[in-house]
Image: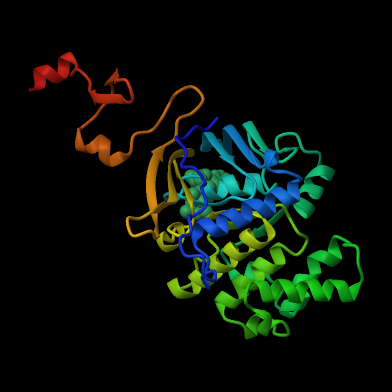
Amino acid sequence: MTATASGSARPAPRHDPGPPPAVPDLATLQQRAAARAAERAGGRDRLRGHIVCDGLVRIFQTEGVEVVALQGLDLVIDRGELVAIVGASGSGKSTLLNILSGLDTPTAGIARVAEYDLLALSNRKRLAYRREMVGFIWQQTGRNLLPYLTAVENVELPMRLARRSGGRRDRRERARRLLDLVGVGHCADRRPGQMSGGEQQRCAVAVAVANDPEILFADEPTGELDEATGAEVFAALRTINAELGVTIVVVTHDHAVSGQVRRTVAIRDGRTASEVRRTARVTADGGTELVSEEYAVLDRTGRMQLPAPFVEALALRDRVRLDLEPDHVEVRPGDRTHAEENER
Ligand SMILES: Nc1ncnc2c1ncn2[C@@H]1O[C@H](COP(=O)(O)OP(=O)(O)OP(=O)(O)O)[C@@H](O)[C@H]1O
Ligand SMILES: [Mg+2]
């Protein structure tokens, strides 16, 4: 199981009791999301481990060649969290999202979302899982919306397919409310071709939460957009997280985006390698500032990955020396081998 020296999710201390800021800060949004998620789940004690991956493995077989896309990935995400996943191309981000959204099946390990064991889903249960539990947003704007339906019709469609209770008028009302929430109410009666890329992606966010899923997955939802437009789409995700308490996992290459979440998980070679957590801290003048701290991820058996710059800086190779100090562990270059000594 993933263990990190976690930054506590303290609310941002407020010193000025005046009106709340127009754009709530990260800590306030996270606090609101956790409260909404707890309401949905029936209590705070059920926040832990909404998504649990332990030793998750996915091996692809193509023409006799094996590709190990995930090699023992550990990850725990709590209810109401908004987590960014980053990592180099081919590191396994999409593979992870496809498994967690029920589109693909893992080869081995544990993948559990709420009460669903993703390694042992019957076809019927998988369909129910995908319909009721998760929403998904693809990178390609064209893949998220039907081109011949208006925005409001696109949002209504999943509700119709799931035979959501309530009549046509209820569905339309909910669809318009969701479009308003993500800031594209003005596009309700337009078709995707009459909307900008960013508007289409925000509409896709509304479509993805139409059936009130517990979790929303987004695979590079801002990948085809410029920075400013991407920021608007990301703001829509944050609003959905804070207002509806939906747990959100978003894969992104966009550094600006990963700077706007409290927790960023980096995947390297099919494993979680490190995490950045941002916490609010009170400054000397009584304001608050966000502090980013990077943690290495320690797995259940005590393995961790050193960041590449650390390894390079000390030319660490093959073996390292570990020394236990009262409050930390020291890592030093190990002895050189006999052959290396002879080379010198
Ligand atoms: N269906 C498949 N068949 C065979 N190999 C696959 C398949 N899907 C992914 N892979 C391989 O698994 C590894 C992880 O791929 P994945 O798509 O998860 O990476 P990614 O982190 O999403 O990369 P990117 O940032 O480029 O989207 C890659 O080596 C990829 O080639
Ligand atoms: Mg990918």
| Residue at image location 57% in from the left, 34% down from the top | 57
Which of these two is toward me, 171 or 54?
171
Residue 276 lies, with reference to residue 45, above or below; the image says below
Can the viewer see residue 59? yes
User: Observer-nearest residue: 276 or 200?
Assistant: 276
**Residue 113 visible:** no
| Residue 306 placement (x, y as % from top left) | 34, 34
> Is 305 left or right of 137, judged from the image as shown?
left
Residue 254: percent from left, percent from top: 43, 61
The quarter holding residue 143 reads: bottom right
Q: Residue at x 62, y 60 (%)?
A: 242
Vertical position of residue 136 compared to residue 107: above or below: below
Q: Quadrant of residue 173?
A: bottom right
At x 78% / y 54%, what residue is drawn?
A: 131
Left or right relative to 154: residue 108: left
Question: Relative to residue 196, is residue 50 drawn left or right?
Answer: right
Q: Position of residue 207 (x, y in %)?
A: 71, 67
Give coordinates of residue 238: x percent, y percent: 57, 62
Q: Nearer the viewer, residue 318 or 153?
A: 153
**Quadrant, the C terminus:** top left
Of residues 140 and 323, the one drawn nearer to the viewer in this rendering = 323
